[in-house]
Image (spheres, rainbow, N blue to C red):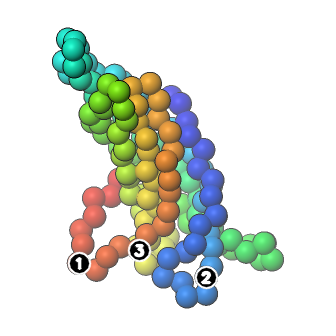
Amino acid sequence: MNSLALHAIVREPGNDLNSFVEITGVVAYQTILVPLDPIPPNPQFAVILTLNADAEVRSYNPRVPFSPVWHVLGSSTEWVPVPESGNAFVTKSYKINGRSDGMLLKVKFQVTLTSVELSSMWLELPRVGRVEDLD
């Protein structure tokens, strides 16, 4: 399996004090290329993408050495159609375990026929009345 490092300091949503959290961890991934219609002139492909996330989220305040640590664990397998000359994006939602507000770590991946890259990540509070498919 290959892996992508997760490391960022991001604003904590819902907190009026402009506080930040640090995200550290890894997403291990495996890809399998599937030819859907390999005949020219317009070959079509998909990627079976297996993701395994393991990360920690903690309050970021350099002046406070000990802060709460929350964990993120999640696994999924995605079927991602990818155009031959381009890329596709997959956004995954991971529940941050140990938090009472249901906060989610959102990770957006860029998938091509030959690579997987981390496009962006952010934190999000769930919307009231919305059912989210969590991994």
Residue 92 x %, y %: 38, 52
Disc 3 packing (10 Å; few <14; some 14–19; many ≥20): few
Q: The residue tagged with tag 2: helix, strand or loop?
A: loop
Residues at marks 1 and 2, CA–CA distance in whole angstroms? 26 Å
Question: Could you tell me if the residues under marks 2 and 3 are in contact, i.e. CB atoms within 8 Å?
Answer: no
What x and y, as percent, mark residue 73?
47, 53
Taking the view exactly as shown, the residue that stands out farthest to the bottom is 16
User: Could you say which disc has been placed on residue 125 in the image?
Assistant: 3
- Looking at the rendered structure, the number of numbered marks drawn on it comes to 3
Comparing labels 2 and 3, the label whose residue is closer to the camera: 2
Q: Is residue 69 visible to us here?
A: no
Q: Amino acid at mark 1?
A: Gly
Q: What x and y, as percent, mark residue 56?
A: 59, 59
Task: Report the residue marked by disc 1.
Answer: 129
Of the image marks 2 and 3, the number of the one nearer the N terminus:
2
Q: Amino acid at mark 3?
A: Leu
* Amino acid type for the residue under numbered disc 2: Asn
Q: Residue at x 63, y 53 (%)?
A: 7
Going 27% across and 24% down the picture, which residue do you hit? Answer: 45
Question: Among all residues in the image, which is located at the extreme top?
Answer: 39
Q: CA distance from mark 2 to mark 3?
A: 15 Å
The quadrant where residue 131 appears? bottom left
* Helix, strand or loop under label 3: loop
| Most foreground residue, 115 or 71 | 115
Q: Is residue 131 above or below residue 14?
A: above
Q: Nearer the viewer, mark 1 or mark 2?
A: 2
Where is mark 2, residue-wise?
Answer: 18
Separation of marks 3 and 1 at Cα, in angstroms: 12 Å
Q: Is residue 113 left or right of residue 3?
A: left
Residue 98 or residue 12, whichever sits in front: 12
Could you say whether the residue bearing mark 1 is in a helix, strand or loop?
A: loop
